[in-house]
Amino acid sequence: MMLSRDLSQTDLIHIGNDQSKSTSQSDRLLKYISECAIILNPDGIILNFNEQSKYQFQPEPGTSISKYLKSEHIEWLKACMLGENQESANLQFFNGSCVKECKGECIPLPTEDAYMLILQDINQLPEELIYANVFARAIHGLLIINKEGKIVRSNIFADRLLDLPSNGMIDLKDLMAQFKTNEKVPGFLQPLAPHKEKEMISKVININNRNYEFTKVTDITIGYHLIVIRDVSEVVEYISRADQQDTLKVVGQLAAGIAHEIRNPMTSLKGFIQLIQSDIKDSQKMYFEVINSELSRLETTITEFLMLAKPKNSVMKKINLTKVLEETVHIMQPQALLHDIELHFTKSDLESWTFGDANRLKQVFINLIKNAIEATSVKGHIHISIQRKNNGLIVSVRDYGCGIPKEKLKKLNEPFFTTKENGTGLGLPVSLKIIEEHRGTVEVISRENEGTEFNISLPLSS
């Protein structure tokens, strides 16, 4: 073994092979060692190292460890690798003009044909060691970037979240380009910086379907900035729900103020039209049919407004959900036949009792089947089913129509949002509110030109 020899082309090939070996147990081990740790091959070539080593020495992969040690310390290391010496030693580690005194220990890694050099007590104050450990094991992600935007140090949380390599500096801007910014929460981080200080910049990034707050604190020391990463998924969800409730509240107040004022004159108009309809000429009947149709549509819209303004008091009792669905399918069968669409109902052999209001749940199922009919082309099929799963009941309404674009799926519970030309955008928010009152959940699966499936989960009653 020659630790002090220069590297040749053959050595570089050998290093590449050894580096591929060191990406298993040793790499994982490096993450959890609080002291400086360096992985060496049997020739003393540096294969890998942990964050503490990078911070203290800035070693270079592929270089010989002899570049950083005195000759007598190299002889000690050779003896350790050959198994002739198991004792630790006091070392001096060189890096340019910097000299660090430390205690060295060499541990063989037989499964990888490599060695781990651990350097302890690197003339640091105990407080500095504590700070290094706090940084590495913090419950939030921490990144230190230089003025060029390169990540020079990261902790365990950030390494796992962003899948950072164990060595080498990465441009933060290039790394973040692969993730999507959550534009729905602008100003979300103002409470962290109530005075709107310019040195604190924040945004929310979506990673693996969760929301993370990235806060940049500039100039923590000259030429370096700190990035703090927090998982704020629950907070973002809470804000989103609060916004929806505020919208529904405003809609309800608006509905309460105008719905009755519209309904009264509309009822009078409808009554007078019915009185004179028998005396009109055949050539004019078409106009009156259009008037009646439009008045009925207007009445439906007002009813939905009133549902938001003053929901009905639910009469909760033990009900057979299968029976409720059978009645709903029977009600909707004529409308499906008018559109030349077949309704297929599949029920479970097991009992399907739940606790709820049969009429309000029927309203939800009618709305979903009606939407499915409108989304399905002529001679299409709609499948309705109920089944038991664990301690709950799953009601599914599946069509094979036009589907809903992915970017619009998240807006289905927003009042006034609709994918239909003449829709009000109130039917689904009312339906979702009813399911929520029944302690249920709704899952929507949809693909364009393939169809949409609504899965409603309700608790099973004993």
Image (cartoon, rainbow, N blue to C red):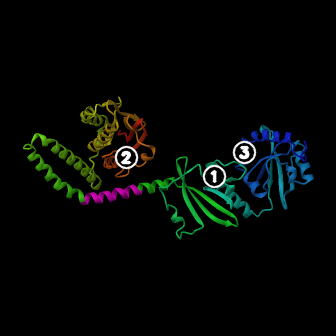
Q: Nearer the viewer, mark 1 or mark 2?
A: 1
The residue where tag 2 is placed is: 439
Q: Secondary structure at mark 2?
A: loop
Give the residue at mark 3. Answer: 27
**Residue 331 part of the magenta segment:** no
Q: Is residue 237 left or right of residue 35?
A: left
On screen, residue 279 versus residue 349, left or right, reads left
Q: Is residue 412 left or right of residue 340?
A: right
Point out the tag, 1 or 3, that comes first from the N-terminus: 3
Classed neighbour count for the residue bearing mark 3: other residues with Cα under 10 Å, few (<14), some (14–19), many (≥20): some
Q: Position of residue 53 (x, y in %)?
A: 77, 54
Q: Which mark is residue 174?
A: 1
Q: Amino acid at mark 2?
A: Arg
How far is disc 3 from disc 2 in space, using C-alphas? Answer: 47 Å
Q: Is residue 249 magenta?
A: yes
Looking at the figure, which quarter contains the N terminus?
top right
Residue type, mark 1 in image: Asp
Q: Secondary structure at mark 3?
A: helix
Chain part drawn in magenta: 242-257
Is residue 155 shown to the viewer in this render? yes
Locate residue 353, reporting x and y percent.
Answer: 33, 37
Where, by quadrant of the figure, is residue 47 drawn? top right
| Rendered location of residue 303, percent (x, y) | 24, 50
**Residue 442, percent from left and from top:** 39, 43
**Which residue is the extreme one toward the bottom?**
195
Could you tell me if residue 134 is visible in this image? Answer: no
